[in-house]
Image: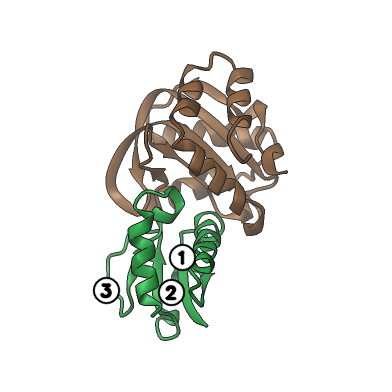
Amino acid sequence: MKKIIVACGSGVATSQTVASKVNRLLKENKVDAQVEAVDLKSVDRYMDSSVAYIAITKIDKEYPIPVINGIAFLTGVGQDAELKKLIEACK
Amino acid sequence: MKRDMIYKDLIQLDMEAADTDDFFDKMAAKLEELGFVKSSFVDAIKTREKNFPTALAVEPYPVAIPHADPEHILKPFIAPVRLKEPVKWCEMAANDVEHDVKFIFMLGFKRSDEHVELLQILVANFQDESLMERLMDAKTKEEYMEAILSMEGL
């Protein structure tokens, strides 16, 4: 199963919420991947083992894996486009 | 059900705040007095908000969902606030974009698993225009609370 990470500033509010939402969407779309909420400070350590990074904070550096806009999953605005990118990254 | 985390006593209607720091000073004092947060909360939430702002650019009105790390929380809560005049609030994940925020739902969570569904429900309902108009027009805390409790899914 492929791994996707999500991180927010505290690890308790938004990232868990986005993780739960995205996990549901992936299941609905029959994508074999699991979203894990991780601590923002440890994001770099997950780059090798993850296929995408869902960000809920401002990104000011380049990552080797696709970065997905997590706010879209929180609000639903622009969600379809971000989900498409995410599914693509899981292929 | 998690709706009992929403306290009528914490609702602030037409609260006056000059900016976000002023808002946090006033709310933190109230939350501390009522035993919801530790004294460390006020600095924690200000710092966190500066690094990770929490305004959501939803329609019809932007809504802010400020929250601090769980270690500063004594008792989980949601504090719904409507400001008298909007204050400038930076957007989540787009720190340099500001919104005029009038509606705030301050979140105090102790554990990560207790609120996941609740936060999804709140954010979905922030985009319900008739619900937000009810919040805009509510004259009393009772009316405000009633509107919140009528949220779909809550």
Please say if B19 is above or below A36.
above
Can residue B24 be seen?
no
Chain letter tied to green: A
Say which chain tag 3 marks. Answer: A
Cα separation between marks 1 and 3: 16 Å
Q: Which residue is mark 2?
A: A43
Query: Crowding near pointer 3: few (<14 within 10 Å), some, many (20+)?
Result: few
Q: Secondary structure at mark 2?
A: helix
Left or right position of A86 against B138: left
Q: Identify the amino acid type marked 3.
A: Glu
In the rendering, at what x and y percent does residue B108 appear? 60, 45
Can residue B4 be seen?
yes
Say which chain tag 2 marks. Answer: A
Please say if B35 is above or below A10.
above
Cα separation between marks 1 and 2: 7 Å
Seen from the viewer's position, the closer of residues B119 and B67 is B119
Assign the N terminus of chain B to one quadrant of the image: top right
Residue at (67, 45) in percent of width and height: B76
| Residue placed furthest toward the top | B139
Q: Are marks 1 and 2 in contact (CB under 8 Å)?
A: yes
In the rendering, at what x and y percent does residue B14 appear? 48, 19
Q: Which residue is mark 1?
A: A7
Query: Which label sits on residue A62?
Result: 3
Q: Secondary structure at mark 1?
A: strand
Q: Identify the amino acid type marked 1.
A: Ala
Q: Earlier in the sequence, mark 1 or mark 2?
A: 1
On the same chain: label 1 and label 3?
yes
Seen from the viewer's position, the closer of residues B16 and A88 is A88
